[in-house]
Image (cartoon, grey):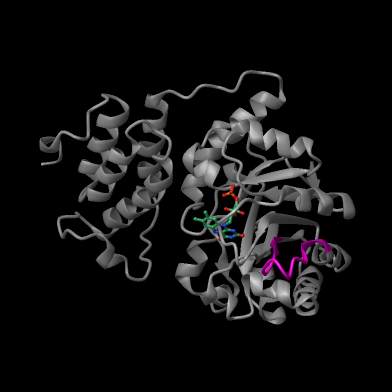
Amino acid sequence: MKISDIELPSPYAIAPMAGMTDTAFRRLVKRQGGCGLVVSEMVSSEGLVRGIDRTLEYTEYTEEERPVSIQIFGGDPEKMAEAAQIVQGLGADIVDVNMGCPVPKIAKHNAGCSLMREPEHAAGIIGAMVKAVNIPVTVKMRAGWNEHEINAPELAKRMEGVGAAAVAVHGRTAAQSYTGLADWDLVTRIADAVDIPVFGSGDCLEPEQVIDRLRAGVEGVLVGRGVLRNPWILAQAADIAAGRAPREVTMAERGQFLLDYIDLLLSERVHEPQGFRHSVGASDASSRHDRWVINKLRALGSWYTKGLDNGSHLRTAINSAESLGQLRAFIEGFFFESVSFSTQPYFS
Ligand SMILES: Cc1cc2nc3c(=O)[nH]c(=O)nc-3n(C[C@H](O)[C@H](O)[C@H](O)COP(=O)(O)O)c2cc1C
């Protein structure tokens, strides 16, 4: 599969997820195999244009992640075009535009999904970006703003008309947020109606579902929460597509993934999202960097532990960890030694 002249090694991709799909996580998922494209967390075009360090950190990637798409958000055509040039200058393969975020903080600034309500303006943004860069410009949208304003099919056509190289559609409206089910019939209809590649997104929690979605006619699948629960899902989908049984993942491998994630995060520079000082309660955490890593593990842990036997116990343990040593011990105990987390003294 190709996006313009960028060859993707497979049609399965890691969906952009704010707070989750940092470079460390993407690298670890990519190493498991089957992943054709990684997309960054959404990055503020405003922040990029103003050269804010913390914003630039969200654009970090490594060579092993290629092809890499960096997703930006914003509502001002000139700033979006300038931000696209910055993304191109950073060496990314693709620049993606967020037209799906329903969060009011983003939507009220004419960005994210609210752009779907202003197709003319949205087309102006994409047109300006396409003129400003040589790398492919892609768009990720939802089905529409709400059930009365489902316009992804028209908008996708319009985006194609102004030069978008691919579109991705999460088959829910902004009003739905994450309730209900993604409308894959709608996604398939869009794929039939435009000539550029269409990625579908929504509710693929099992590798078989990823394959079924492709069979239904879309060219690619962006997997979000399914990757957070099971980072091997893309590799397993590739196994099925190749006629092999999906690989089995041992508890030890699952545990090692979290330990490797901790190590990769530790090797990165300090990020300090707003308010994070208060989110780790205890003062024992050895450093700010350690606390940042602990918070990242808490965020991933809330997804990763779903569906695991006694996963809620591990989740509680991770949330109570006050040092990296404790965090590692909880993970090792759970995955390598099957320690029962209902045993209170273990925590002391
Ligand atoms: C925690 C989280 C963060 C997300 N952040 C973004 C984002 O930054 N940009 C974006 O386009 N979509 C974002 N999404 C939407 C996902 O990319 C995806 O389209 C959606 O979750 C549906 O796919 P899924 O059912 O496989 O998770 C986010 C989803 C989640 C769960």
Farthest top residue? 244
Q: Quadrant of residue 176?
A: bottom right
**Residue shown at 15%/40% (left/top)?**
347
Q: Is residue 9 visible?
A: no
**Residue shown at 78%/75% (left/top)?**
119
Between residue 3 and residue 103, name the one nearer to us: 103
- Quadrant of the rendering where the N terminus is positioned: top right
Instruction: Tell me which segment is drawn in magenta.
Output: 140-153
Callout count: 0
Q: Is 253 situated left or right of 69 in this image? A: left
| Rendered view: 214 above or below 141 | above
| Rendered view: 83 above or below 310 | below
Q: Is residue 236 visible?
A: yes
Point out residue 114 in the picture as x, y percentages from the top left corner.
65, 74
Point out residue 132 in the picture as x, y percentages from the top left corner.
77, 72
Point out residue 95 in the picture as x, y percentages from the top left corner.
69, 61
Figure quarter occupied by ligand 1:
bottom right
Residue 26 highlighted magenta (yes or no) = no
**Residue shown at 15%/33% (left/top)?**
343
Q: Is 68 situated left or right of 54 in this image? A: right
**Residue shown at 73%/70% (left/top)?**
149
Point out residue 185 in the picture as x, y percentages from the top left corner.
77, 48
- Quadrant of the rendering where the C terminus is positioned: top left
Q: Quadrant of residue 129?
A: bottom right
Between residue 155 and residue 73, name the one nearer to us: 155
